[in-house]
Each structure stands twice: as C-alpha cells, then as structure tokens.
Amino acid sequence: MWRWLLSKNADKKTHVWMQFLLVSASIHVSVLFALFVLYRGRDNNASIVLDRSLLAHGVPVVIVARAPLAQTLCIVSTPPANQAKPQLLAQPATSVINSPSTSVVSTPSAKQSPKSAALPMQQTAQASAVKPTNIQAKTTVVKKEKPAAATIAKKEEPKVAPQKQQPVIAKKEESKIMPEKQQQHVAAKKVDEKKSDAPQKIVQQDAVKQQPIAPIAAAQSAIPEKAVSSIAQVLPTAHADQKAQINGAHAPEIDGPIIVAKDYREKTTIKKHLLLQQELVRVWHPPVGIAQECQCQLRVSIGSDGAVRAVHVLDSSGVLMFDVAARSALSSAQLPKWTWGTSIDITFS
Amino acid sequence: MCFWLCIIMSCFFSIIQANDMTVRGTQSAQMGIIVSHIGSQDDALVQLVDVIMHDVQASGQFYSKKHYFSVTPNKTQDIKQFFAQGYHFVLVVNRSKKKDDLEYRLFDTITGSMVAKASGLYHKRGKSIQGWAHHIAAAVWPVLTGQASMFSSQIAYCKEAVRSNGMLAKYICVADHDGSHEQIVVEVPTVNMAPRWNNDLSNPIILYSEHTNTNVRLVSIDTHKKRRIVSDFEGINMQPEFSYDGTMVVYCASRGDGCCHIYVYKDGSLAPLIVNEGNNVSPTLADDGHTLYFCSDFQTGSPQIYAFHMDTGKLRRITNGGYCASPSYCQKRKQLVYGKMMGGEMQLFLYDEKTKEHRQLTTSPGNKEECCWSPCGNYIAYAYTKGLQSRIAVFNLITRKERFITAASARCSYPAWSPCYETFPVFA
C-alpha cells in the first residue's frame, strides 16, 4: 500500500497524513483485538442465578472444559453456608496438583475435610487417566534398564510424596516393580545361562506390566468426552467410574447439586458470584410473615473502598419491610473485593 | 470519538448486566420500629404511643421501643441514628394544628426519608384514645407488611363470675385484640353466652344468648348498652351468623322440638334452613352468600362438618369420622377452621375449600374449642380448656405461636372476633 502511494506520486503532506492514518488504524486494530479477543469483557462474566440451597450443601464447582481442553477436569469445593467464612474464601485456593492436564483446587473447609482428604486420590486417578502414554513410557524405560529400575522407583517416591501428586501410581508402580525385581533376578540368571533368550522375555514382561495400567487410562480418558455431551448426568458417572477404577480408594462423592462451568473463566466468575452470594445469604434474613412470592430487585453501587454508595430499588416488592430488610442486608454486608467499584443488580426473594 | 464511546459504553453495560444475582433467604427475622411522639409529655400522646407499640408488636414481626422527640426531627441524621441501634423504622405521632387531627409519619432509618404512603393526617374517630391509636397503626400496617390489620377489632367473650349471693353468673366482656382494655358489656345476673358480632361496620352490635327460666333467648346489645330481645322461641336460640353483606342472618333454634335446627332470616321472613333428626349448630356463611357450613350429628351420631348450598340444596359432608365441631369460615383465606378430637383433646384443623385438604394446626395439650377468625385472617381465637383452666387464646398463623389473652385465674369461653368497624366500639 505504501508503495502504491509512492507510485501515485503523492506529495509529502499526503504521505504524512497517510502515515498517520496507518498508524492510527493499526493502533485501533490492536486495541480492538485486545479488547474483544484477549480481554473478552472482564473475565467473561456470566449472568448466574444461584440458589441458596447450593451453598447450604457446600456445593463443589466442577469445571469441565469444552472439546479443545477435553482433558481438563477441575473441582473447586466451597465451604458450606453455615460455616461461611469470607476470610477463608478470600485466601488463594491451595492448589494440590498442577499436572499439565489436570488440576484440582480445594479451599479449606471443616465440613468438607473428608472430601478434601480424598481429593488427592482422585487427582492421581485423573492424572493417570489423562497421561497414560507418559506412564507407559516410564514403565518401559524402567523395564529396559533393569538394574536402574529399583533405584528410579525409590527416587520417584520422595519426589512424589511431598507434592501429593501420585501416591496411588507410585504404589502401583512399586507393587509392579517388586515382581519385576524378582523377574529380573530370574532373568539375570537366565541371561547367564542363555543370553539370546533375554530380550524376548523382557518384551513379554513389558506386555504383562502394561496390562493393568492401560485399562485405567483408557476408561478414565473417556470422562471428559462424556462430560461434554451431558454434564449433569455424566459427572456422577464419571466419579463412579473413577471410584470403581481406584478399587477401594475414597473418591469424593458429590451429593446434592453441583455447579458446572465450561471453562476457567466461567469458573472464576462462578467462584466470585459464590463469594458474593455467600456473604449476602449470611446477612439476608427476610422479615417474618412475608409471602414467599415476595421479591425485590435492587441495584447497588459499591465504592472503590468496598462501601455501599447507593442502593436503588429497581423492582419493589410492594412490601416496605421487605424492601427495607433487603437494603439493610446490603448495608451490613462485607462485599468481596471483586465487587468494589462496580454496580450489581441483586434480586432478594 | 463516538466509535470509542460506543465501545466503552457497550463494555460497561455488558459488565453491568453480567452482575445479576438472586438471593433466596429462609431464615426470617424480626424488624425494629421506634414509636415516638413530639412535643410536650402529653398523657394522651403517651397512651397513644403505648397502644401503637403494642399493636405493632402483637404479630411477632416487629420489636419496638418508645422514644420521645422534643422537637420535630428535621435532619435525616436524627432518623438514621436508629439504624445503628437495630431499628429499621421510626413512627412519629404528634398533634396537628387542628384539634381533631393527629399527624403520623413513618421514616425509613436507612435513608432517613419519610415514607409518604404511610404518613398523613388522622381525623379522630370516636372518643377512645386506644381507638385512635389502633386506627393509626392500622393505617401504617398495610404499607409496612403488605397485609391487612386487625388492630381496630375487638374480641367478645363470656366470662364467669361469682355473684355476692354465691350464685354463678356469666358476663359478656369485650377486649382489644391482645386482651387489653377489657370492659364488661353485659352484667345481667344470669348465664349469658356465645356472643356474636354483626357485620354492619357503622353500627356495631353484639348478639348473645341469655338463660331465662323458660328458654335460652337471643338478645342484642349496642354500644350504648341498649338491650333488645331478638329471638325468644321455646328452647334455645343462639349462635347467629350474619352474611357479609348484612342482608341475611342464620342462627340455631330448637323451637321446642328437642333438636336444634338452623333457621334463616332474610327479607323480613324467618324460614327453616337445616331441619333433620340431629342437632345442627355453629352455622357459618361463606363469602359467596350461598354456602353454609355447620356442624351436625344427624348422620353418624357424632358431630361432623357439613357444607350446604342454599340455592341448590346440595349437602356435602366435609369431615369423615371423628368428633368435629365449631366450624368458622375465613373470607380472606377461603378456609375453614374447626376443632377435631385428637387423642382425647380437641385440636384445630384447617380445611381449604379449593384443595379440599385438611391440615392440623395445633398439637399442644389442651382443648381448643369455639374457634373464630380475626378479620385479617392471620389469627384464630379459641377457648382453651385444660383442667380447671378456661382461657381465651389466639393462634398466630404467621409465627405459628399461640398466646393467651385472658388471665389464668379468669374462666373465659366463647370468643368472637369483631370485624374492623369504622369507629372503634366502646360500650358505655
């Protein structure tokens, strides 16, 4: 285009203007790209209607990725409403596993301690499910370098344990490696006797060792596909599958309703909304003797310091004490940080 | 410039719209209200404030506190200060420039602003201060709660007394909805029972049954305590029930037959309505003016609740078995309350005409008999008897709590809740 302009023998003044136009256009394009593609409207906030009963059961938020991220499964457990502690929730979630394809995040909760305790087991199962090829590769390496196999397994244990990443796998590997050692001894003796037979036996051993791992990986790799097709139905079955595959290990049983997010942006949004909802549920006590159909919608403007600046009644309930109780709840709420400097529409019912 | 402005605005609105949330609450809480008056420590105003305070507390939805403003609160801060103390509303009452008026204002303590709908001038009706207070509370209540009130209604009941000669007498008394300000209306030295109110809102009248040497006759008494015999047939004459438009009245009379029947008085003529071989008592009319509910034992030998359509003559039994008595229909709720024997004690049951379902209301020990509705439909008054005790109790359908409105030492029975009359009835 520039050459085309030059070829047109435009004068210098026009060149300058065209240059300015191009620079301006490129800035526009880059800013728009950042705004609509990268930024995507502030964490992809979605309009969510949350029921109080969800919080009452300490509902976990399950994030199931769409097809491109089909191997991602994430569980965010929230504390129950009865023991709602915004301080706890405000703390950064303690990540347990950060494997390339699987992540499980849990926040501390007294009620959910058994669940959270059970999570690592699930994580290992997921990890093994997600990366079957790597595990297989490891096992083959172990088998090929026979004398180093035991040392590798022992070295892996201390590394894995503090991360709490793959205790089950480590045990399984151990249990599988132990017979390997015996076999290696036997093989070594046989190698002394007949060196030519050794490679064939090793191949056979590899095949035997790979058998128990492969079905687990195959079965669990199917979870995300199911989840994508029907999230509500698949999640319990996915957990059931995991439970069955782990063989006696305590997989988390999600009873009651769950919130499903499609991606991490939505997960973040839901988590934020849960924080706000939890706080509002804590302070919201509807007046005695008001009809259940009664509801009012308020728009609350929150200052940058977290204080409620203004509350506008968008849709009145028609009952003064109900509206006032809702406004009173807002004024006494300690709103989470993400709401500061924003305006939120809240329906009280 | 406009282009960028549009983009920024669209982003802003997308963010605004995204932050929607619905919060549902199940725990319910009481709210606080300050009832105050302005100016001098006027006895009348103090009494007025006291009565209003009792009124707003009666339902269990509010807790209240009395306050006194020396001058009219002009600054919002004067009102807002109460929010920090846990009070959500301030009701201020003061005298108007006109002698016969009272001013009342309701303030919201969060914003400190006045609620226009619940503020205004009250023109004094009647001479009773408690009547003024009830009327002011009744004016504010629907705006506050979205419900009708019963503050300006009264409860009539029968109270036992021992005369100077040692003979037993039963008087007819009237008290406020919370049992306060009791006054004896009928003090004739005989047994007077089963009072009922009429539905003429401008002329309150109580009708009751008076024992004589020959019969039990139906007598009426107005607010000037003028008594008139209404029905004096042989046998018993009792339990009159007025239709909602006041054009018809049904009542029980035996007329020397030995069995009690239900008669209707309409357009100046008396006609038998329910006549059979059993006893038919406690007639109560539905708001449609055509359906009559009553209690009869003519089919099973034990009392049952029946519905009778006066136009078609169709009779339908509502209850199946047991001992069911004293039905009372509520116009507001379209429901019927009655007493049923459960485990040797009478308990209250609710019957919904729409769903045809029966629901037990009370389970506490003690007999609950002769129930009747408040005009707002949120309360049921009944005679509570246990051992030697006989008291009037009120069951709150909002809070599911019951409370006594008469003392344990007094033996009271046959409660009847009045409608909300235009002028607070004072029997003098």
Image: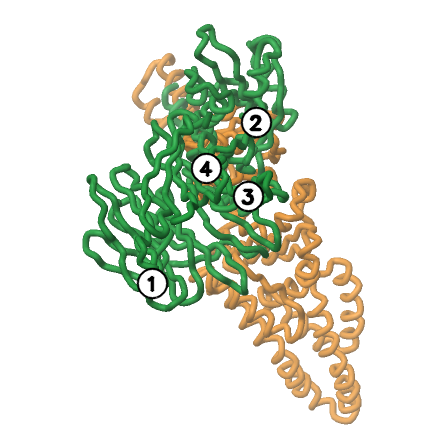
Chain colours: A orange, B green
Q: Share a chain, discs 1 and 4?
A: yes
Determine the image quadrant of residue B75.
top right
Measured Cα–Cα span from mark 3 to mark 2: 31 Å
Residue position for label 4:
B18
Circle 2: residue type: Met
Q: Are marks 1 and 4 in contact (CB under 8 Å)?
A: no
The amino acid marked with disc number 4 is Ala
- CB under 8 Å between discs 2 and 1: no
Mark 4: secondary structure: helix
Question: Between tags 2 and 4, which lies in front?
Answer: 2
Q: Are marks 2 and 4 on the same chain?
A: yes
Residue type at the position of mark 3: Glu
Q: Is residue B400 left or right of residue A195?
A: left
Q: Label 3, on which residue?
A: B160
First in sequence: mark 4 or mark 3? 4
Q: Does residue A270 appear anywhere in the picture?
A: no
Which of discs 3 and 2 lies nearer the camera? The answer is 3
Mark 4 belongs to chain: B
Q: Residue A56 appears at what percent x and percent y?
A: 58, 51
Return the disc, 2 or 1, that comes first in the chain's sequence.
2
Residue position marked by numbered label 1 in the rendering: B278
Marks 4 and 3 sit apart, C-alpha to C-alpha, by 68 Å
Q: Secondary structure at mark 3?
A: strand
> What is the CA distance from the residue labelled 2 to the residue labelled 4?
44 Å
- Distance of mark 1 from mark 3, alpha carbons? 30 Å
Please tell me which of labels 2 and 4 falls first in the chain.
Answer: 4
Mark 1 touches mark 3? (CB < 8 Å): no
Q: Is residue B229 above or below residue A203?
A: above
Q: Are marks 4 and 3 on the same chain?
A: yes
- Mark nearer the N terminus (3 vs 2): 2
